[in-house]
């Protein structure tokens, strides 16, 4: 019997012999010729044209995962230690005002010594506080001051400071000490009770599923694969299950990076959302737009801002390709030694360990930076797509922070960035997967299919967000 040489219609034999099921006839006048005497050369292995397609791994490098049993995680962060106010206004030759919570005692005491400054022109005066008035119901506190070096806040003499022309809310003030006469009491001193600044976040439930019918499961089609999770060899329909699992594992990270809480005019009523990394930095951290890498001025402004925050010595930069190359060019343009050397303290002083993780280190001022490309910002199917813009990278402090745990009732150390997932002795929801249906060894329903389910419940905790920097364009 002659059969057409169509790929897929040949039935292989266990022995090398010509049978009617595997024999090609080139003399039946059907248009076959000896140019078609061979079957196509088929590569069994799948071509990895996109390389490693997975995006997760960012949080594994900078944080940790910890279980929790509640619908909400709450943590407290320190306020600043010293007393300072922005948006201070000139009121008269001897008084200035600033906003403060209504009906709360003014925390600047009588006989405190303060510095009043105008950032617009650099002018400043050191003054003694002679009276301090609580804000009352108006929410505006008033202090009366006498300058140490001139008669009043107007000045007028040669070289004296004049605050009267300052724009409303333009002045700043901070307390640097106090001065009292001999034999006086301390009855005017305001006792300051520190207040907890509390933040919270709630986990979101993430789900995915893969389904294959019983008929398709019985029609085995093999393909040789080597997947990103280490799976290799010949797979059939489970090839798709493997990719569903890989995609879901990426979702576990992408969800907490991009998550948003329901707020504003949103009409979503079924879920509450969660605060992701980008949202937390925009709300409580620092954001710099269109950083200029042609010189060090913008980068140095970041360092100056870090000085006003926690001044964490070691920081990690996760950048897209454009900003990463820009910083490389910026560093390359510096003379030898201008970087101040390279440090690897975060990686146990091992240069090899740092490079194995893809980090390159440099030092500027008193800060060490470890820079690496963030694949999530470069991948064409996520934020690397040409149509998606807005995020160029993040700066994340390394190490841990100390916070007050409401449940334990004590201070504990946590990574600045970490994931909390729901788990108890009854159910661990960090990464669940199970099979239902009536195919593939599962006999849980009359569904003629196999369903592979994935579920996780988690949220991201961003502590000390004032030390984070978001690079946007």
Image (cartoon, rainbow, N blue to C red):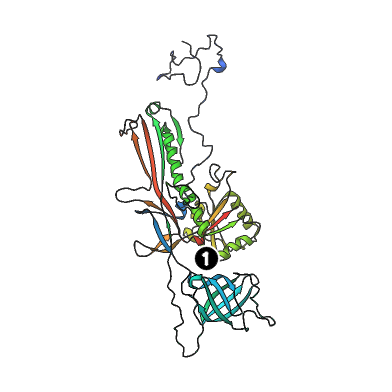
The local secondary structure at tag 1 comes to loop
- Where residue 314 appears, as percent x and y from the top left, is 51, 61
Extreme residue toward the right, this view:
158
| Position of residue 150 in the picture relative to residue 24 (left or right) | right
Which one is in front, 230 or 291? 291
Q: Quadrant for residue 166, please give it.
A: bottom right
Asked whether residue 230 appears in the rendered view, the answer is no
Q: Can you say whether 33 is above or below 362 in the image?
A: above
| Position of residue 386 in the picture relative to residue 265 (left or right) | right
Extreme residue toward the front, this view:
137
Asked whether residue 294 appears in the rendered view, the answer is yes
Q: Which residue is drawn at 58% across and 57% down?
A: 288
- Where residue 431 appears, as percent x and y from the top left, is 38, 46
Q: Can you say whether 40 is above or below 368 in the image?
A: above
Residue position marked by numbered label 1 in the rendering: 309
Extreme residue toward the top, this view:
28
Q: Which residue is drawn at 49% across and 61% down?
A: 345
- Where residue 411 appears, as percent x and y from the top left, is 38, 65
Q: Which residue is drawn at 44% across and 42% down?
A: 248
| Position of residue 240 in the picture relative to residue 426 (left or right) | right
Which one is in front, 73 or 95? 95
Please rate how many residues cluster around mark 1, counting C-alpha atoms within 10 Å: few if below 14, some from 14 to 19, many from 20.
Answer: some
């Amino acid at each position: 019997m002659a059969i057409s040489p169509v790929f897929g219609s040949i039935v292989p034999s266990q022995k090398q012999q010509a049978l009617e099921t595997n024999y090609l006839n080139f003399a039946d006048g059907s248009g076959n010729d000896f140019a078609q005497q061979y079957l196509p050369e088929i590569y069994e292995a799948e071509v990895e044209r996109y390389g490693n397609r997975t995006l997760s791994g960012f949080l594994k490098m900078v944080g940790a995962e910890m279980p929790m049993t509640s619908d909400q995680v709450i943590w407290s962060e320190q306020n600043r230690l010293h007393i300072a106010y922005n948006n201070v206004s000139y009121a008269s030759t001897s008084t200035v005002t600033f906003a403060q919570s209504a009906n709360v005692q003014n925390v600047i005491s009588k006989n405190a010594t303060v510095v009043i400054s105008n950032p617009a022109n650099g002018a400043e005066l050191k003054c003694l506080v002679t009276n301090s008035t609580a804000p009352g119901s108006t929410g505006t506190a008033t202090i009366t001051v006498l300058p140490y070096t001139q008669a009043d806040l107007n000045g007028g003499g040669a070289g004296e400071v004049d605050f009267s022309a300052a724009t409303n809310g333009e002045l700043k003030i901070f307390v640097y000490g106090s001065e009292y006469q001999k034999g006086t009491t301390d009855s005017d001193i305001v006792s300051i009770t520190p207040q907890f600044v509390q933040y919270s976040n709630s986990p979101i439930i993430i789900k995915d599923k893969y389904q294959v019918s019983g008929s398709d499961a019985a029609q085995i089609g093999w393909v040789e694969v080597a997947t990103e999770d280490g799976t290799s060899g010949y797979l059939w329909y489970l090839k798709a299950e493997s990719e569903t699992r890989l995609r879901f594992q990426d979702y576990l990270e992408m969800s907490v990076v991009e998550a948003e809480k329901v707020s504003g005019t949103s009409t979503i009523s079924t879920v509450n959302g969660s605060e992701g990394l980008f949202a937390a930095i925009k709300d409580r951290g620092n954001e710099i737009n269109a950083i200029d890498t042609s010189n060090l001025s913008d980068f140095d402004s970041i360092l100056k801002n870090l000085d006003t925050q926690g001044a964490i010595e070691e920081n990690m930069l996760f950048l897209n390709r454009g900003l990463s190359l820009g910083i490389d060019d910026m560093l390359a343009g510096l003379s030898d030694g201008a970087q101040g050397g390279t440090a690897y303290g975060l990686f146990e002083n091992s240069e090899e360990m740092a490079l194995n993780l893809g980090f390159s280190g440099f030092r500027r001022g008193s800060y060490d930076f470890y820079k690496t490309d963030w694949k999530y910002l470069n991948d064409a199917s996520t934020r690397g797509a040409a149509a998606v813009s807005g995020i160029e990278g993040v700066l994340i402090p390394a190490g841990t922070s100390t916070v007050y745990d409401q449940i334990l009732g004590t201070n504990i150390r946590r990574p600045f960035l970490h994931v909390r997932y729901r788990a108890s002795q009854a159910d661990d929801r960090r990464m669940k997967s199970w099979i239902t249906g009536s195919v593939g060894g599962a006999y849980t329903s009359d569904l003629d299919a196999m369903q592979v389910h994935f579920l996780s419940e988690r949220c991201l905790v961003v502590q000390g967000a004032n030390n984070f920097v978001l690079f946007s364009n």
